[in-house]
Amino acid sequence: MTIFEAYNSTKKKLEKCGIEDYVFESKQIIKHITGLSASEILTHYNRKLTEFQENNLVALVHQREVRYPLQYIFGEWDFYGRPYYVGPGVLVPRADTEILAEQCIKMLNGRENAEILDLCSGSGCIGITLALECKNSNVSLVEKFEEASRYLEKNIVRNKADNAKFIKGDIFEAVASDKKYDLIVSNPPYVSDMTEISPETSFEPETALKAEDEGLEFYKAITKLYKNSLKPDGMLCFEVGINQADKVLDIMKAEGFEDITVTKDLNGIDRVVSAVRKTEVN
């Protein structure tokens, strides 16, 4: 089987099992099994796969046919141009979350030695991105669960984020809230109905997805528990689910936040809600 034949076969199988982005995924799979770049694949498309590569392809495609996440199969995924270890027990980094990171970087523009707190950190992709993009910053990443924590610690080392520090703890206990921060950021669990998630998402940890109170549980807790951990003109920034932006905006308003901004993702969905703590709030 040539590389070209393998690509076409993979594309047909992924399309047949209902994978929406089957063209992109097929390219990623061929790159993964051959070790070639996209440009090298184009110039070597008639090259035959080795027996090992063919067997690897069969096993990998079978996993995708049962909708096991591609990111878990690869064991890593890029976020904001950097690689992150991922696997069972940790949420997969998503392109939509890059919008959250971008908004935080924009808000921190011009702030020297920014103190940043990342709550519900998971793989650490948000906090590590901010640590590396916001020079001279200090980032504390809080994660409760052991499985996710292992990936987080490895990702800090992998990306050489020396100014990022992992803190194991439960955000509901106001862990790391004794300091004053320029920015607190979180992509918390916000799924209220687990029957509505995609087949791939069903393999991800429910603890990183499900939230009570119509999906608003974490937004309410974080806003209340951490509002006074922000410096004057400190900022709070959340990723939110579909149709949650207005409700999260109201939560932040009720806790005294101002200058509330809603940012859309690449699909035009309200994805990020950010606000400023102008003065001491009670």
Image (spheres, helix red, strand yellow):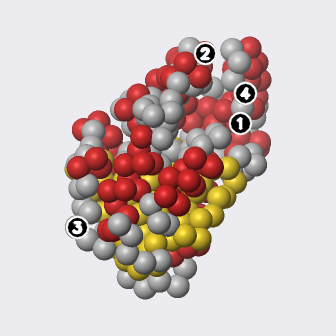
Q: Residue at x 59, y 65 (%)?
A: 260
Q: Which residue is mark 2?
A: 65
Q: Which residue is mark 1?
A: 24
Q: Secondary structure at mark 3?
A: loop
In the rendered image, residue 253, in percent from the top left (x then y), is placed at 53, 60
Q: Residue type at mark 1?
A: Phe
In the rendered image, residue 79, in percent from the top left (x then y), is placed at 54, 52
Instruction: Looking at the image, tell me whether mark 1 or mark 2 is earlier in sequence order.
Output: 1
Q: CA distance from mark 2 to mark 4?
A: 12 Å
Q: Secondary structure at mark 1?
A: helix
* Residue in the foreground of this view, choosing between 4 and 166: 166
Q: Quadrant of the C terminus?
A: bottom left
Q: CA distance from mark 1 to mark 2?
A: 15 Å
Dot 3 alpha-carbon crowd within 10 angstroms: few under 14, some 14 to 19, many 20 or more: few
* Residue in the foreground of this view, choosing between 21 and 187: 187
Q: Residue type at mark 4?
A: Glu
Q: Residue at x 46, y 72 (%)?
A: 277
Q: CA distance from mark 3 to mark 1?
A: 45 Å
Dot 2 alpha-carbon crowd within 10 angstroms: few under 14, some 14 to 19, many 20 or more: some
Q: Which residue is mark 4?
A: 20
In the rendered image, residue 248, in percent from the top left (x then y), is placed at 54, 50
Q: Report which quarter residue 25 is drawn in.
A: top right
Q: Which mark is residue 178?
A: 3
* Residue in the foreground of this view, choosing between 60 and 192: 192
Q: Are circles 2 and 3 on residues that touch, CB within 8 Å? A: no
Residue 201 lies, with reference to residue 114, above or below; the image says above
Instruction: Looking at the image, tell me whether mark 2 or mark 4 is earlier in sequence order.
Output: 4
